[in-house]
Image: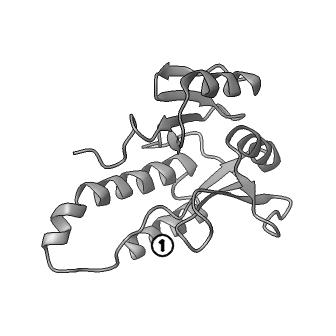
């Protein structure tokens, strides 16, 4: 899996795949891994054990606009010392070193023609209260759509971002 991800990052950095293709492929790989985790535990160990997604790399026309949106809407924290003027690491989840995740927002080229795309990214939030979540999104000038426990908004570059309740949007359903 590590080699697969390393090759995917290389393809992204060299322009063979765009941001959406990168995110979709990475999300699909993580989903396949999660779905096969119980079957894999019965088989002899092969390769590395994945803990989760480390980061999502996000090329966009203006990283600062993306940084400001993700920090204000989702409370992500810009990693100190990692804002280069064209790129910022936006932390979320557990503390660094304990499984934390981040979005790399960077100003960079985007490809308009893709063979496959990542449809959306879903972030799970704790202590879901439908009215409060909707009100907070509307306070940020957003118009959330979706159902109870699963709402969608668009970021500044019209990328579909889902916010999920950990109860209704379980990652490991059986």
Q: For the N terminus, which image quadrant?
A: bottom left
**Residue 41, position as x, y percentages in the image:** 19, 70
**Residue 101, position as x, y percentages in the image:** 57, 61
Q: Could you tell whether 92 is left or right of 8 in the image?
A: right
For the question of whether residue 30 can be seen, the reply is yes
Q: Which residue is mark 1?
A: 6
79 or 108, nearer to the observer? 79
Q: Secondary structure at mark 1?
A: helix
Q: Could you tell whether 157 is left or right of 124 in the image?
A: right
Q: For the C terminus, which image quadrant?
A: top left
For the question of whether residue 107 can be seen, the reply is no
At a point 59% along the width and 21% down the height, the residue shown is: 131
- Vertical side of 142 occupied by 171: above or below: below
81 or 131, nearer to the observer? 131
Q: Could you tell whether 89 is left or right of 25 in the image?
A: right
- Vertical side of 70 occupied by 85: above or below: below
55 or 42, nearer to the observer? 42
At a point 37% along the width and 51% down the height, the residue shown is: 28
- Vertical side of 162 occupied by 109: above or below: below
At a point 77% along the width and 49% down the height, the residue shown is: 63
| Display coloring | one colour
């Amino acid at each position: 899996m590590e080699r697969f991800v390393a090759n995917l990052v290389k393809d992204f950095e060299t322009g063979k795949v765009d941001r959406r293709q990168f995110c979709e492929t990475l999300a699909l790989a993580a989903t396949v891994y999660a779905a096969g985790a119980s079957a894999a535990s019965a088989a002899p160990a092969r390769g590395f054990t994945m803990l989760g997604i480390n980061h999502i790399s996000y090329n966009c026309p203006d990283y600062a606009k993306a940084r400001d949106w993700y920090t204000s809407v989702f409370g992500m924290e810009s990693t100190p010392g990692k804002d280069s003027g064209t790129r910022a690491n936006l932390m979320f989840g557990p503390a660094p070193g304990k499984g934390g995740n981040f979005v790399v927002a960077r100003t960079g080229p985007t490809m308009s023609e893709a063979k496959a795309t990542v449809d959306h990214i879903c972030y799970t939030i704790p202590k879901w209260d439908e009215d409060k979540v909707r009100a907070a999104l509307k306070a940020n000038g957003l118009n959330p759509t979706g159902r109870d426990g699963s709402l969608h908004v668009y970021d500044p570059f019209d990328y579909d971002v889902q916010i999920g309740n950990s109860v209704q949007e379980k990652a490991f359903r059986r």
